Amino acid sequence: MSALVVAIARTADREAFALLFRHFAPRVKAFLMRSGLAANAAEELAQETLLTVWRKASYFDPARAAASTWIFTIARNLSIDLKRRERHMGTVDLDAVDEEADETSGETILMSAEREARVRAALSKLSEEQATIVRLSFFQEKPHSQIAQELGIPLGTAKSRVRLALSRLRTLLEDLK
């Protein structure tokens, strides 16, 4: 089995991973169920374990441990993390969280409105060309390639204009933090 993990690490060998998955998925699931997880949670964690094996295969050292030891250690650690998260979620006072979310202070609202007004004023000080490119890029969230196409300019020009407009905005809004 160690050779399969090494093959995954070296060449991202999908066949080796499929063999490893078929062998270990049911065993890891059973191990997790014996540690107290429900069947569906154990199934999900087993899949997450083997996905971690795929992503971190390069960290496996056959000289330090067998593949099975390494894989079951990953499963155990993921199980511990899950139990900690569940325990933490059980201790959070949900009423306090709701109260905090509902209490937006007048000061926060005022500061937000002032910032918005400052940003609008700074935008009005940009050239029409720069203001347009900022609106397209940040408010309409269009990629640079689409902006270039819409404005009929080369991609490099669109990128330069965005960079220059942001630099100008930064200067205008320097004290706003």
Image (cartoon, rainbow, N blue to C red):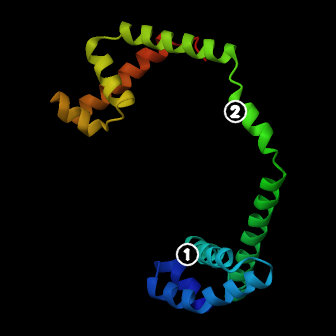
On screen, 131 above or below 31?
above
* Amino acid type of the residue that numbered disc 2 sits on in the rendered structure: Ala
Circle 1 sits on which residue?
Answer: 54
Q: Amino acid at mark 1?
A: Trp
Circle 1 packing at 10 Å, graded few (<14), some (14-19), many (20+), is some
The part of the image, by quadrant, that contains residue 141 is top left
Give me the residue at 71% from left, 85% from top. 63
Looking at the image, residue 119 sits to the left or right of residue 165; the answer is: right
Query: Where is residue 109 drawn, in percent x and y?
Result: 62, 16
Indicate the secondary structure of the residue bearing disc 2.
Answer: helix
Label at residue 6: none
- Where is the C terminus found, in terms of image quarters? top right
Residue at 54% in and 78% down: 9
**For mark 2, what is the residue?**
101
Up-down: is 63 above or below 168? below
Whether residue 62 can be seen here: no
Whole-percent x, y for residue 74 in the image: 71, 75
Q: From the viewer's perspective, is residue 94 above or below residue 58?
A: above
Circles 2 and 1: CB atoms closer than 8 Å: no
Which numbered disc, 2 or 1, marks the residue that appears first in the sequence?
1
Crowdedness near tag 2: few (<14), some (14–19) or many (≥20) residues, C-alpha within 10 Å: few
Query: Residue 47's x, y, as percent?
Result: 59, 76
Quarter of the figure with the N terminus: bottom right
Q: Is residue 34 left or right of residue 166?
A: right
**Residue 102 rendering spot, x and y as whole percentages:** 69, 29
Tell me the residue at 31%/18% (across/down): 130
Query: What secondary structure is marked by label 1?
Result: helix
Extreme residue in the left direction: 152
Residue 90 lies in quadrant: bottom right
